[in-house]
Amino acid sequence: MNDTTEVTQRDRSGLVRRDGEQSTRSMPITPAVDIFEDGQAVTLWADLPGVTRDKLDVRVHDGNLSIEAEAVVPTPANLRLQHAEVREPRFARTFTLAPDFDTSKIEASLQDGVLKLMIPRREEARPRRIEIKAG
């Protein structure tokens, strides 16, 4: 064994890791998000590079919105991978939603690795103008 050889082992998920190093599979990346709010809705844009629709999971439960995804790093079919420094990253992020949002009407779309979620406010929670009567 020479000085540049590292001792590696496989963890439970099958990933090869160096001794003393945590598996990247267990440490998800927190995706960057932009959030825009108006009186009608909140629009959330999440950066998920390399994520396809079938590897994306968006859920709402008990007032929490969770995003989980796994990126796909393509390898050409005719090549055998000997060493990889870029792994297939996992993304995860959770948001707590106020009760004035209508979670049954959330709209989601994914385009070019960017997830767009539009979360509308409940009708009764939207701002409205109150007419004032004279007299």
Image: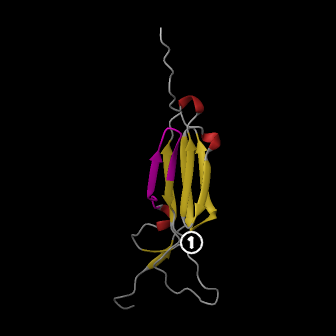
- Which quarter of the rendered picture does the N terminus lie within? bottom left
Vertical side of 121 occupied by 58: above or below: below
Q: Give 63 or 47, whichever is nearer the viewer.
A: 47
Q: Position of residue 11 (x, y in %)?
A: 52, 69
| Residue at the spot 47% in from the left edge and 67% down from the top edge | 24
Q: Secondary structure at mark 1?
A: loop
**Figure coloring:** secondary structure
Q: Position of residue 122 (x, y in %)?
A: 58, 34
Q: Which residue is mark 1?
A: 14
Residue at 59% over, 42% down: 61
Residue 96 versus residue 3 in the image, above or below? above
State the image quarter where residue 57 is shown.
bottom right
Residue 91 locus on image (x, y percent): 51, 61
Q: Is residue 12 left or right of residue 37?
A: right
Above-or-below relation of 65 to 78: above
User: Who is closer to the viewer here, 90 or 15?
Assistant: 90
* Residue 54, placed above or below residue 35: below
Residue shown at the point (57%, 72%) measured from the top left: 72
Q: Residues within 10 Å of mark 1 (few under 14, many from 20)?
A: few
Residue 43 falls inside the magenta stretch: yes
Relative to 60, 20 lies left or right: left
Q: How many marks?
A: 1
Q: Residue at x 55, y 55 (%)?
A: 116
Residue 59 magenta-highlighted: no
Which residue is farthest left?
3
Q: Magenta segment range?
A: 29-44
Question: Seen from this angle, which residue lies furthest top?
Answer: 135
Image location (x, y in percent) of residue 18: 42, 75
Three-letter residue code for mark 1: Gly
